[in-house]
């Protein structure tokens, strides 16, 4: 049985990789995987935020079916569902995770910028998911708010407070600052080193499933200076935006640009309006973000080298990200509330040094397909709750006819060249409905929802969502009021779900 190395990043824009278009820096190690492996160039995340996406990796289930629909509320990953660890252990694998889990909603209201709180109940829960080994670095922010394994290490060194202060007690940094210590102490370096230790120390008696779960390049953008210095912003292609694009009141992110709200970047600027970031800030932000990608790439190379030393060619690498990042495009950073291609499309590569197979697959696939793909590699049956199919079978069938990406209060459905988005904004209690022609308008500037030319496309996609609601309560699971009632109910008139507000 093949050893499996699962490498994931958090909030990585696919075009921050040089093989996929980055111009300011090089990512030779990921590029090697892409050149010698199978690239899924139209891979989408089943969710634009962390927890639902990660729980779908674990189970192959869509978020509205597992109940894990939100970073903030809803269900943690149920211990009753078969997952990567439980199923691979049945097959005889030794399993481990090094880095970020985020399979349970974070209690954000309890966090303190000036204090790190206990985390033992989280650690206990994670270990019950079936992994043999856990080295927990549960997101850069979480490691400052809560005592995971990385935070404990930094506390013992007397370095946690300074790191926490730079991230959470220094608002003028606006979430961008050089990592204040040696680069090898950065959270991403810590996770990689733990992964390499696990590979090098693994027994020859059992196959291994080793998951390196980087928390970068997710904000805070805290890259060590030596990696920032590797980025040449004079070669930057520039942010994608259009003057006046947020004058349209029908568009959800008009609120984030003019303030207040939407993506996380709104919380670090005057009036919570991302229009108030200067071009100098965007350049600094992007340079540091790209530098974090360069750093992760270097560690991926070391992980693959360790696997080759240990197992020769008897291993497979699966590389992807839970979702993307706006990266200053459309004058936004972050992902919360975003259904742009920047966030929904993710890098996805499978590298098998034994197969010698290199290919680029343009068919649309979904991140729920990763679980059954790993099961197929391991020769393990897929549980009946799984919504994904192995990637090779998905491609052979022509890819997904429909792509759905979902989390609390938002959903996108893609069919052919059309993308329909519903996005509920809590601050003004308004549902935003948008339609984009991603072939004619690949950067998604023009909302066509009310355009008569696109009336049939809107009706077709909304009918599809209504069908999914009837069959499996897709919409009413995602869109909820605080009193537990859905925002939209199906009144049975063929359009009630779409048009009748409760």
Image: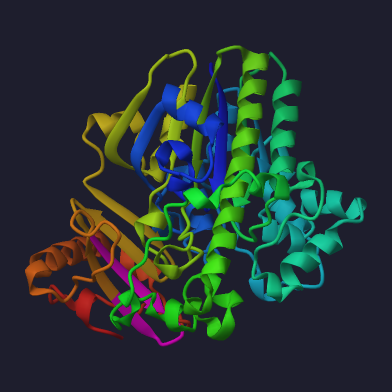
Residue 421 falls within the magenta-colored stretch: yes
Query: Residue visible at 67% across and 48% down?
Result: 126
State the scheme by which the image is colored: rainbow
Q: Can residue 12 be seen at all in this image of the molecule?
A: no
Q: Quadrant of residue 122?
A: bottom right
Question: How many marks can you see?
Answer: 0
Residue 158: % across, % down: 92, 56
Dominant secondary structure (helix, strand or loop) of the stretch shown in magenta: strand
Q: Nearer the viewer, residue 108 or 292?
A: 292
The image shows residue 77 at horizontal and vertical percentages of 55, 53
Residue 45 place in picture, x, y as percent: 41, 50
Q: Left or right: where does residue 254 sit relative to residue 133?
A: left
Whole-percent x, y for residue 55 in the image: 51, 50
What residue span does the magenta drawing correspond to?
A: 419-432
**Residue 216 seen in render:** yes
Note whether 215 is above or below 208 in the view shown: below
Q: Residue at x 38, y 68 (%)?
A: 410
Residue shown at 30%/32% (left/top)?
Answer: 361
385 w.r.t. 353: above or below = below
- Of 128 and 54, which appears nearest the observer? 54
Quadrant where the C terminus lies?
bottom left
Left or right: residue 142 versus residue 400 is right
Say if the magenta span includes residue 137: no
Q: Is residue 407 left or right of residue 76?
A: left
Drawn side of residue 43 relative to residue 74, left or right: left
Task: Place residue 428 in its image quadrant.
Answer: bottom left
Q: Image height check: is 240 above or below 423?
A: above
Which picture quadrant has residue 190?
Answer: top right
Q: Is residue 194 above or below residue 310?
A: below
């Amino acid at each position: 049985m093949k050893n499996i190395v699962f490498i994931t990043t958090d909030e990585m824009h696919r075009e921050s990789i040089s093989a996929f278009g980055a111009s300011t820096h090089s990512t030779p190690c990921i590029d090697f995987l892409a050149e010698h492996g199978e690239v899924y160039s139209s891979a989408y995340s089943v969710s634009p935020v962390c927890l639902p996406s990660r729980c779908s990796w674990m189970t192959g289930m869509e978020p509205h079916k597992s109940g894990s629909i939100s970073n903030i509320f809803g269900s943690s990953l149920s211990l009753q569902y078969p997952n990567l660890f439980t199923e691979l252990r049945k097959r005889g694998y030794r399993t481990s995770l090094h880095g970020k889990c985020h399979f349970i909603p974070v209690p954000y209201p309890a966090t303190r910028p000036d204090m790190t709180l206990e985390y033992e109940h989280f650690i206990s829960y994670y270990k019950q998911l079936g992994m043999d080994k856990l080295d927990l670095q549960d997101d850069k922010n979480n490691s400052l708010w809560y005592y995971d394994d990385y935070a404990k290490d930094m506390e013992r060194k007397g370095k946690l407070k300074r790191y926490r202060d730079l991230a959470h007690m220094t608002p003028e940094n606006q979430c961008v600052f050089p990592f204040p210590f040696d680069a090898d102490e950065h959270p991403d370096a810590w996770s990689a080193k733990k992964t390499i230790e696990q590979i090098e120390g693994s027994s020859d008696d059992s196959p291994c499933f080793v998951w390196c779960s980087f928390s970068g390049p997710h904000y805070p953008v805290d890259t060590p200076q030596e990696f920032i210095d590797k980025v040449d912003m004079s070669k930057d292609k520039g942010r994608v935006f259009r003057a006046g694009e947020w004058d349209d009141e029908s568009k959800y992110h008009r609120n984030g640009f003019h303030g207040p709200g939407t993506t996380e970047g709104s919380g670090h600027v005057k009036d919570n309006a991302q229009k108030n970031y200067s071009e100098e800030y965007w350049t600094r932000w992007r340079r540091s973000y790209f530098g974090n990608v360069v750093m992760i790439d270097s560690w991926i190379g070391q992980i693959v080298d360790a696997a080759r030393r240990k197992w020769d060619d008897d291993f497979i690498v699966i590389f992807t990200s839970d979702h993307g990042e706006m990266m200053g495009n459309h004058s936004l950073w972050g992902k919360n509330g975003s259904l742009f291609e920047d966030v929904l499309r993710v890098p996805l590569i499978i590298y098998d040094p034994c197969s010698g197979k290199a290919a680029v697959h343009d068919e649309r696939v979904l991140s729920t397909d990763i679980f059954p793909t790993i099961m197929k590699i391991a020769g393990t049956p897929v549980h009946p709750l799984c919504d994904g199919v192995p990637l090779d079978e998905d491609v052979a069938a022509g890819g997904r006819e429909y792509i759905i990406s979902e989390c609390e209060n938002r959903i996108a459905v893609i069919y052919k060249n059309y993308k329909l988005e519903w996005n509920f904004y809590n601050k003004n209690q308004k549902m935003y409905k948008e339609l984009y022609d991603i072939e004619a308008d690949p950067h998604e500037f023009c909302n066509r929802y009310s355009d008569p030319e696109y009336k049939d496309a809107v009706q077709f996609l909304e009918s599809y969502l209504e069908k999914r609601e009837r069959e499996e309560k897709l919409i009413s699971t995602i869109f909820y009021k605080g009193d537990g009632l859905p925002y939209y109910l199906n009144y049975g008139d063929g359009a009630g779900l779409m048009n009748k507000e409760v």
